[in-house]
């Protein structure tokens, strides 16, 4: 068995994705929770300065997609990326949609005005009070800037609610035929989508959209059970 360490922020959907891939593949691993105050130092280990990265027998691999594909190559069973070229392409396209579209909704909603304090406590609850009160406005502004530049952060609450309804209906429709978004078994697309969509559901607006969709709740439960979700 390889020695694997996942460097993570527990609340990050990308880190959640890697944990689930490792669990599904039955690969034992350790986690290292990166201290919030030391974010600038991530770059010393991973040139993009982002989490997650893993150490696999000493080799550093960054980016959740690259990590998932590297794991797939090293431990092909059970598969998360289909061999069929069309299914493989669909899985990769949907994974990218989750990472590059759904992610901005979860960031905008979980760290937006309505839910910031609750989410911040999850992220920074263990820090001393004086550090927390210094960090909160910085983090809030950082997320505001990122989502505003990307565009989702400029939308009104009504527009966001419509978008989340449409996105959740899309996921629900994709999974409805077989219980999985591509083919008839779990793929990396399900993992990536559920990691981001469950974070969206952690916001007030997302929770109420999920409450109206029992089929989607059932899909989340099914993927959580298959991937031993350890959400924080
Ligand atoms: N495309 C990357 C995205 C990773 C990412 O955005 N990670 C965030 C945490 S959710 C991060 O490390 N942010 C720290 C920073 O940007 O300084 C992946 O899939 O791993």
Image (cartoon, rainbow, N blue to C red):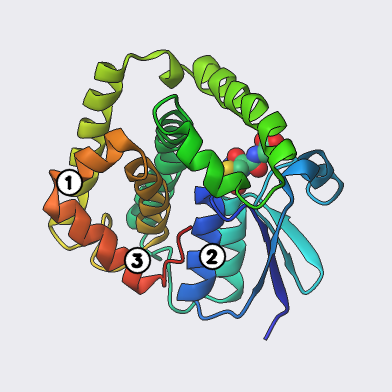
Frontmost of labels 1 and 2 is 1
Q: Is residue 17 above or below residue 37?
A: below
Q: Residues within 10 Å of mark 2 (few under 14, many from 20)?
A: many
From the viewer's side, name the closer residue of 67 and 161: 161
Task: Residue at 43%, 47% (x, y): give it.
Answer: 95
Q: How many numbered tags mark residues here?
A: 3
Decide if residue 47 is in sight here.
Answer: no
Label 3: which residue? 224
* Left or right: where 151 falls relative to 225: right
Label 1: which residue? 211
Task: Residue at 51%, 22% (x, y): give it.
Answer: 147
Ligand 1 position by quadrant: top right
Instruction: Tell whether label 3 touches label 2 (CB within 8 Å).
Output: no
Q: Residue 146, image x and y in percent? A: 57, 23
Task: Residue at 39%, 28% (x, y): give it.
Answer: 114
Between disc 3 and disc 1, whose residue precedes? Answer: 1
Decide if residue 129 is in sight here.
Answer: yes
Q: Residue 28, image x and y in percent? A: 61, 80
* Left or right: where 141 falls relative to 171: right
From the viewer's side, name the closer residue of 213 and 188: 213
How far separated are the C-alphas under marks 2 and 3? 12 Å
How far separated are the C-alphas under marks 3 and 1? 17 Å
Q: Circle 2 sits in a helix, a strand or a loop, which is it? A: helix
Label 2: which residue? 19
- Quarter placement of the N terminus: bottom right
* Left or right: where 56 falls relative to 229: right
Q: Is residue 31 above or below residue 107?
A: below
Rendered image quadrant of residue 32: bottom right
Q: Residue 161, image x and y in percent? A: 25, 26
Instruction: Tell whether label 1 touches label 3 (CB within 8 Å).
Output: no
Between disc 2 and disc 3, whose residue precedes? Answer: 2
């Amino acid at each position: 068995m390889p020695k694997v360490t996942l460097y993570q922020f527990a609340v990050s959907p990308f880190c959640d994705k890697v944990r689930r891939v490792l669990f599904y593949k039955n690969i034992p691993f350790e986690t290292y929770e990166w201290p919030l105050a030391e974010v600038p130092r991530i770059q010393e280990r991973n040139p993009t300065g982002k989490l997650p990265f893993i150490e696999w027998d000493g080799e550093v691999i960054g980016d959740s997609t690259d990590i998932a594909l590297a794991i797939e190559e090293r431990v092909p069973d059970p598969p998360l990326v289909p061999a069929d070229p069309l299914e493989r392409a669909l899985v990769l396209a949907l994974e990218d949609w989750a990472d590059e579209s759904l992610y901005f909704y979860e960031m905008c909603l979980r760290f937006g005005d309505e839910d910031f304090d609750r989410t911040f406590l999850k992220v920074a609850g263990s820090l001393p009070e004086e550090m927390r009160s210094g960090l909160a406005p910085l983090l809030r502004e950082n997320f505001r800037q990122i989502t505003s530049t990307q565009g989702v952060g400029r939308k009104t609450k009504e527009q966001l609610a419509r978008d989340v309804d449409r996105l959740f209906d899309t996921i629900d429709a994709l999974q409805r035929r077989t219980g999985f978004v591509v083919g008839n078994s779990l793929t990396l697309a399900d993992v990536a989508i559920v990691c981001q969509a469950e974070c969206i559901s952690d916001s007030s607006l997302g929770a109420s959209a999920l409450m109206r969709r029992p089929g989607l709740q059932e899909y989340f439960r099914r993927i959580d059970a298959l991937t031993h979700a350890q959400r924080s």
